[in-house]
Image: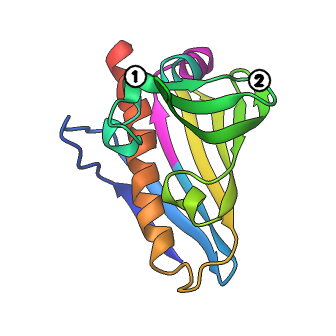
């Protein structure tokens, strides 16, 4: 297991928010990641930004067609985390659990994991803190990968650092 305390973000927008990242578990059948940030945003504001403003904080280079404004999250059971550009459409993940201001759970495989036949549960957990809220992003991925997960898990973890950092930076700019 690898731990990266306060892994600094290296994004063109010069994000300065520290993200605590960890590959918590790695096996022949999958992996578990956990990333966390602290933000001055209250849980309700964090939730609103997560589900309603995804196109404003999700990195465009981690979309299928290079435009984060094409992303939508329907924060209800059976809802869609989708990317739609005209007739081109991608269902990134399905919403399996929504408790506003506290937890959004998505299931499926993000990005290339989808095409690899891998699946997972992606949790966005928002916890009230003294100064605002802590956001914990965890991803439990399972399936079969012929070459194993030792190389893939750290790559997915770094991408999740970027995604969570984008949300945190967006929230802190709004405060």
* Residue at 46% in and 41% down: 164
Characterize the local packing of mark 2: few (<14), some (14-19) or many (20 or more) Cα atoms within 10 angstroms. some
* Residue at 41% in and 66% down: 155
Nearer the observer, 17 or 86: 86
Quadrant containing the C terminus in the rendered view: top left
Residue carrying label 2: 76
**Taking 88 as reference, is 7 above or below it?**
below
On the question of residue 127 being in view, the answer is: no
Residue 39 in the image, given as x and y percentages of width and height = 46, 29
Q: Which residue in the rendered view is the most extreme toward the front?
A: 87
**Residue 84 marker:** none
* Residue at 67% in and 22% down: 74
Range of magenta residues: 36-48
Q: Is residue 44 magenta?
A: yes
Residue carrying label 1: 69
Disc 2 secondary structure class: loop
- In-image side of 23 versus 55 (left or right): right
On the question of residue 141 being in view, the answer is: yes
The disc, 2 or 1, on the residue closer to the chain's N-terminal end is 1
Quadrant containing the N terminus in the rendered view: bottom right
């Amino acid at each position: 297991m690898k731990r990266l305390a306060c892994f600094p973000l290296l994004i063109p927008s010069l994000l300065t928010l520290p993200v605590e990242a960890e590959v918590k578990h790695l096996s022949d059948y999958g992996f578990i990641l956990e990333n966390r940030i602290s933000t001055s945003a209250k849980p309700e504001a964090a939730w609103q930004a997560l589900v309603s403003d995804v196109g404003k904080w999700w990195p465009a280079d981690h979309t299928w067609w290079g435009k984060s404004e094409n992303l939508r999250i329907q924060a209800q059971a059976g809802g869609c985390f989708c990317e739609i550009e005209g007739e081109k459409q991608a269902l990134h993940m399905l919403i399996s659990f929504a408790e506003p201001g506290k937890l959004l759970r998505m299931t499926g495989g993000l990005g290339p994991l989808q095409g690899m036949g891998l699946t997972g549960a992606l949790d966005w957990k928002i916890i009230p803190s003294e100064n605002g809220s802590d956001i914990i992003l965890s991803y439990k991925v399972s399936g079969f990968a012929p070459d194993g997960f030792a190389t893939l898990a750290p790559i997915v973890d770094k991408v999740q650092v970027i995604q969570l950092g984008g949300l945190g930076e967006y929230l802190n700019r709004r405060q």
